Amino acid sequence: MAVSLKGRDFLTLKDFTKEEIEYMLDLAADLKEKKKKGILTKDALQGKNIVLIFEKTSTRTRCSFEVAGHDLGMEVTYLDPAGSQIGKKESIADTARVLSRMYDGIEYRGYGQSIVEELANYSSVPVWNGLTNEYHPTQMLADLLTIREQLGRLEGVKLTYMGDARYNMGNSLMIACAKMGMHFTACAPKAYFPNQKLIAECEEFAKISGATLTFEEDVKKGTEGADVIYTDIWVSMGEPDEVWQNRIDALLPYRVTMDVMRNGADDVIFLHCLPSYHDRNTTIGQAVGEKFGLMELEVTNEVFESEYSRVFDEAENRMHTIKAMMAATLGAFEK
Ligand code: CP
Ligand code: NVA
């Protein structure tokens, strides 16, 4: 039976089958090709309106939703972290019911996953998770598309995630690998492994897909033969500055260096969701770097700028995959 995702929320990849994820990746590849050829898709969702709620800041995700929305012919409203009544003067439930009377889709970036779930429960239109503390599912579609483009396959690919694997990126990559039949390794100190409940859920997905999940403290073992080495910043949005000291103490041995990359497979690639502290050319990179005597944090500038790095292909794919996900859940291109 043909896949249809019309009317579905997009909150975490846990809710989607391998076939449904592949459907969105194929659609993204098709839309990407159309865009490169200058073929317009503005009639796909003309007359529809979407709203983007950002309780945390963003460059890639916001711009991807905006450009993708416009490319599909939609009007877009952006609500910035201070620009709405949400949570302060109006509950999530009331916000969801108001916005679904005006819009055809609602994007939410913010704190707990329970907030985006509540929005979805009360909304009568699709709700899309643009990042929560727990999950970052639109990033996963971009990462999977990038890996597929770069390596020509997903099944059997060995992906090693280095750093804080308990948070949105580590959690989401483990889910994505478990769904797609990939080999996921969290390479981090034990305290930074994903929680047992999520690991157990992913083990169930892995039984179906043939994926494996590995948790490794040793950098040499954890990165040996990896096809993809992935990292993220060590302190995420919304976390207090005080945690930097602990994170640096714990995660500095897990920084992605040229030695780490050389330990991977011959055609290993480096991915990072971005933004990244690979140099001191940011306010935080400069302040933290100066305080702790470091020129770079989770990845060296040498790796970031190297032939291994595919981070800008990955960033571009945010837009193509978000476009596909919105098109699919809003029922565009369905016969
Ligand atoms: N990767 C990502 O989500 O980037 P932004 O925070 O810029 O949206
Ligand atoms: N873990 C990071 C991801 C940013 C895309 C954060 O939540 O800030």
Image (cartoon, helix red, strand yellow):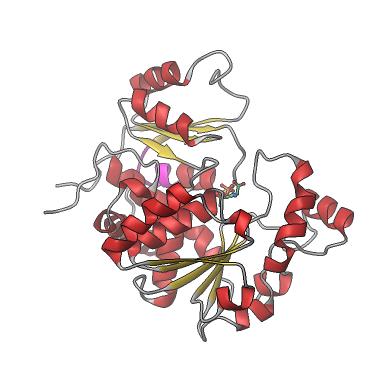
Please give left or right for residue 42 compared with residue 305 in the image: left
In the rendering, at what x and y percent does residue 287 appear?
84, 50
323 in relation to 250, above or below: above
In the rendering, at what x and y percent does residue 30 appear?
31, 61
175 in relation to 9, above or below: below
Q: Residue furthest top?
A: 89
Q: Main secondary structure of the magenta part?
A: helix
Q: Residue furthest bottom?
A: 266
Q: How many marks?
A: 0
In the rendering, at what x and y percent does residue 106 appear?
41, 32
Q: Residue furthest left?
A: 1
Kindly identify the residue that appears in the image at 41 percent across and 49 percent down: 322
Q: Which residues are magenta?
A: 67-74
Of the pair 54 and 223, the residue shown nearer to us: 223
Report the quarter where the N terminus lies.
bottom left
Q: Answer whether residue 57 is magenta in the image.
A: no
53 in relation to 27, above or below: above
Q: Answer whether residue 72 is magenta in the image.
A: yes
Residue 44 seen by the camera:
no
Kindly identify the residue that appears in the image at 64 percent across and 61 percent down: 189
Residue 16 seen by the camera:
yes
Of the pair 309 and 227, the residue shown nearer to us: 227
Kindly identify the residue that appears in the image at 50 percent across and 83 percent down: 267
Kindly identify the residue that appears in the image at 88 percent across and 56 percent down: 290
154 in relation to 317, above or below: below
Please give left or right for residue 167 compared with residue 334 in the image: right
In the rendering, at what x and y percent does residue 211 appear?
36, 67
Query: Toward which corner of the image does residue 205 lie, by quadrant?
Result: bottom left
